[in-house]
Amino acid sequence: MPAPVTVDFYFSPASPYAYLASTQMLPLQIETGCRVDWYPVSGRVLIEKAGYDPSKATPHSGQFQPEYRRTDLARWARLYNVPYRHYADVTIPDGRRLALACVAARRFDAGQVFARALMKAIFVDGTSPADDALCVRLAHEVAGIEPHLFKPTLDDPETERLHQERIAAAIEAGCFGVPSFVVRRPDGGTEMVFGNDRLPLLKQAILEAKG
């Protein structure tokens, strides 16, 4: 039996488009038989290390205008039939810390359940501020990780090392932002697909890899 096709899902818990894409990962696995591995990264750090930030380009693209993005995100949520609350009222002191919190949760084998809970808190419940205290509380409530264990892991240099290692892997695979998906074929080849709006292309790449 051939090895299953796997998909590396690179996401930032502070990205609304990554949240929307995350709601489609389980249906994708059911429809295609692939396995999705969730890898948290700081979207800002990934963009900077990839060497290009389209939001800072001149002239400024209309897709980054706040009102258009609000409308666009709401349309995707309606299309997916998933709950979504615009995050304008949510204070995120440090998006990178949220990514590190997801990395820390992975070290307890609770990465996906924690990431889902964190993005729900931000983009569904509108919990503010989305800070260390929220991460510690969610880790305890949804993953059963005791605060006296989770907080030191969040601050552990090894957690940052793992984060940087994953960013380097994402860039090597051709990623330049979030959400990104790297399809790993049974023959060892890879194919990168970027963006929540390209999930149909991701599905096509998976099915072709299976074929």
Image (cartoon, grey):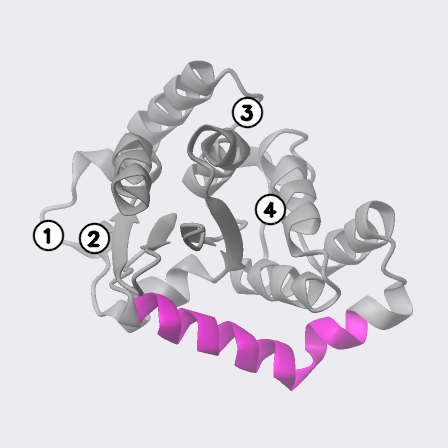
Amino acid at circle 3: Tyr
Q: Circle 4: is it few (<14), some (14-19), or many (20+) Cα within 10 Å?
A: some
Q: Quadrant of residue 133?
A: bottom right
Please identify, in this view, whether the residue under mark 4 or under mark 3 is nearer the observer.
3
- Of labels 1 and 3, earlier in sequence is 1
Residue 84 numbered tag: 3
Per the rendering, the mark at residue 91 is: 4
Give the crowd class for mark 2: few <14, some 14-19, many >=20 residues within 10 Å: few
Q: CA distance from mark 1 to mark 2?
A: 9 Å
Distance in Å between CA atoms under marks 4 and 1: 28 Å
Q: Secondary structure at mark 2?
A: helix
Q: Which mark is residue 163?
A: none
For the residues labelled 2 and 3, the Cα–Cα distance comes to 25 Å
| Residue at which label 2 appears | 54
Point out the tag, 2 or 3, that comes first from the N-terminus. 2
Q: Which residue is painted at 60% across and 46% down in the image?
A: 91
Quick one: label 4 or label 3, which is nearer the N terminus? 3
Residue 58, numbered label: 1
